Amino acid sequence: MHTVVVGTSGATASDVLAVARGGARIELSAQAVAALTASREIVDALAAKPDPVYGVSTGFGALATRHISPDLRAQLQRNIVRSHAAGMGPRVEREVVRALMFLRLKTVCSGRTGVRPEVARTMADVLNAGITPVVHEYGSLGCSGDLAPLSHCALTLMGEGEAEGPDGSVRPAGELLAEHGIRPVELREKEGLALLNGTDGMLGMLIMALADLDTLYKSADVTAALSLEALLGTDKVLAPELHAIRPHPGQAASAANMLAVLKGSGLTGHHQDDAPRVQDAYSVRCAPQVAGAGRDTLAHARLVAERELASAVDNPVVLPDGRVESNGNFHGAPVAYVLDFLAIAAADLGSIAERRTDRLLDKNRSHGLPPFLADDAGVDSGLMIAQYTQAALVSELKRLAVPASADSIPSSAMQEDHVSMGWSAARKLRTAVDNLTRVIAVELYAAARAVELREGLTPAPATRAVIEAVREAGVGGPGPDRYLAPDLAAAEAFVRDGRLVAAAETVTGPLG
């Protein structure tokens, strides 16, 4: 099994994906253990002094003015975890919780939080045992960290609350720890606060969304090329010299992908003999511009994620010179903004894909294709309602594009009077990614059928490879009406797991 070694200098996106989705094992580096030990010595020294230090010998948030005596500090750390584990609603996905825990461990191992090595080892042990704390949908405002979600994780480390075992059953966390020989942690000064004060949930969801969207943008280039071909459009608009004069890198990459998929097509360019159609509709002609802008948005979001992965987000932090200082680095605005930005880009990519699908189904705009791609129009409805489903998904994508980060609800008796709502932005982006996958699957379904209906014309080799692969995957081709939901589900799975891109790449080579 793959092993991720956690050091002091952050983590990579591939590390997060390996732990969250691949079940990779975790080890702490010697440097991380040394950094944990050194920063803990600083916290212990401050705890022994009479002067109050926030997070070490005081209360939290609006209660930070109270100095806590040494005999109550362990209770204080337990209490903050218990009281903050106040989430509600459905459970979030296992991969999200694993990413959340791993990213908190990454920050703990930076040596900037003052947590003891044994706490970090317990975090790694819980992940390695396949124990997943029960974390709920609601409870984070994206400021002072993803508080409730991280608190539910910390509660498991204490042997309290509920968690899911490796067999998928939800049981008391204490039982699961005992079964795997893991001793619950007894928190000391600052440790409770350090376990729940970070942007780890929203960052983990951002990293997974970036991985999924990278595949979806390539998939959209392939389906856009299929639609262009099915509509007898021209590939001349994809020429690299046209995109060089507007040098957005994402646009050039999308155009190059489409051109590669269409190489050798016998369907493109026929409309030049069709006098009423001087040029293709925007949804076809401007596909690289729209998908390209989304690709550039991905690049910006990836930069933000990389910076956040290199960060040690906590409050207060232990600085290299021994100071323990309060700060505002837990505010989720940088991550929240790009999560919302990605939801906007996803909505627009879905919107343009739906317009191409609608064009394929409309006999007045499809240039010779049967109405709704039906076998016997009137007796058969063809793909009429598949497009309805796609339109419903796009409408939902538009609602999900409304930014969460533009909202803020003050909390903690106005101490935390401006919050990022980054967790909410991340949750809706996950839904947007799922819906975009389905939208692209419907376009694939329609475009593949439309290409097959162009009898006497030869599709591009890459197009042919995609259609053959999707048929082998159990997605039915042209013919009389049948129960469509299973076909659409198979098309969705074909897109979701990357087989669409892989099929095209058997001919084109790696797409950009």
Image: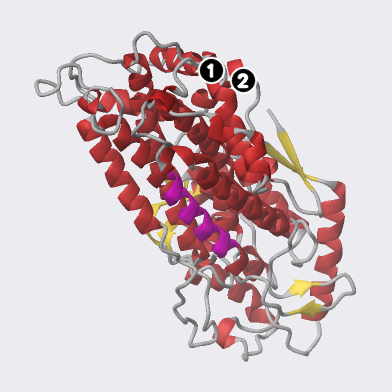
Snapshot quadrant of residue 478: top left
Question: Of the numbered discs in the image, which one, if any, rests on residue 246?
Answer: none
Which residue is found at the position 40% from the left and 40% from the top? 281
Whether residue 119 is visible to the viewer of this picture, yes or no, is no
Identity, as a three-letter code, of the amino acid under mark 2: Thr
- In depth, the one of 98 and 162 nearer the eye is 98
- Is 344 magenta? The answer is yes
Q: Which mark is residue 508?
A: 2
Q: Where does the magenta region start and end?
A: 335-349
Mark count: 2
- When the figure is inspected, residue 138 is found, relative to residue 413, above or below; the finding is above
Mark 1 and mark 2 in contact? Answer it, CB < 8 Å.
yes
Whether residue 384 can be seen here: yes
How packed mark 2 is, by other alpha carbons closer than 10 Å (few <14, some 14-19, many 20 or more), is: some
Foreground: 185 or 327? 327
Residue 460 position, x and y percent, is 51, 16
Q: Name the residue under label 1.
A: 462
Q: For the residue labelled by badge 1, is the local secondary structure a helix, a strand or a loop? A: helix
* Residue 217 % position (x, y): 53, 39
- Identify the image's colour scheme: rainbow, by chain, secondary structure or one colour: secondary structure
Q: Nearer the viewer, residue 249 or 82?
A: 249
Q: Residue at (76%, 67%) from the top-left corner?
A: 114
- Residue sitting at x 82%, y 46%: 29
